[in-house]
Image (cartoon, rainbow, N blue to C red):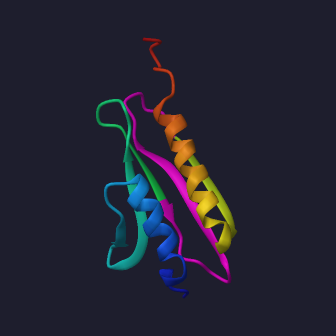
Amino acid sequence: MTSFAEVDPIIDAWAAATAKKLFIEWAGRPARFAYLPGLRPFECFQISIDQPLSGRVAVLARSVDTDDESEFEQRWEGATETLPAMLEEATDRVRTWVNRSPANGS
């Protein structure tokens, strides 16, 4: 299995500009993900990065919890050198979800 080492500088720079905390482990295994808060009470979104494999990497943005039970998820895959653009696009997508119109119209 490939290490995160080749993409960690990119992920670290993104996390420093975007998230309060970057998680680097899940269930005792290497992982890279961060939570982004919503504007509504208790809303939370996550962006995670898969370990690179054969020069490719994937980014997943998803809702963790929303106040209107909306569910969001989008995945990007590409060459490791496109990771900065994928992270920027994922962050922009989460911001779109965060700023969506209220379900009740208010």
**Quarter occupied by the C terminus:** top left
The image position of residue 72, as x and y in percent, is: 53, 42
Q: Residue furthest bottom?
A: 1
**Residue 42 vertical placement versus 91 (above, below):** above
The image position of residue 105, as x and y in percent, is: 47, 12
- Seen at 41% across and 27% down, the residue is 68
The image position of residue 96, as x and y in percent, is: 54, 35
- Seen at 66% across and 72% down, the residue is 81
Asked if residue 1 lies left or right of residue 26, the reply is: right
Q: Is residue 50 magenta?
A: yes
Quadrant of the rendered image containing residue 104: top left
Q: Residue furthest top?
A: 106
Q: Looking at the image, how many numbered discs can be counted on the residues?
A: 0
Quadrant of the rendered image containing residue 77: bottom right
Quadrant of the rendered image containing residue 60: bottom right
**Residue 83 vertical placement versus 72 (above, below):** below
The image position of residue 54, as x and y in percent, is: 67, 83
Given residues 101 and 82, the one toward you in this image is 82
Q: Is residue 83 magenta?
A: no
The span picked out in magenta is: 48-71
- Seen at 54% across and 88% down, the residue is 1
Given residues 18 and 90, the one toward you in this image is 18
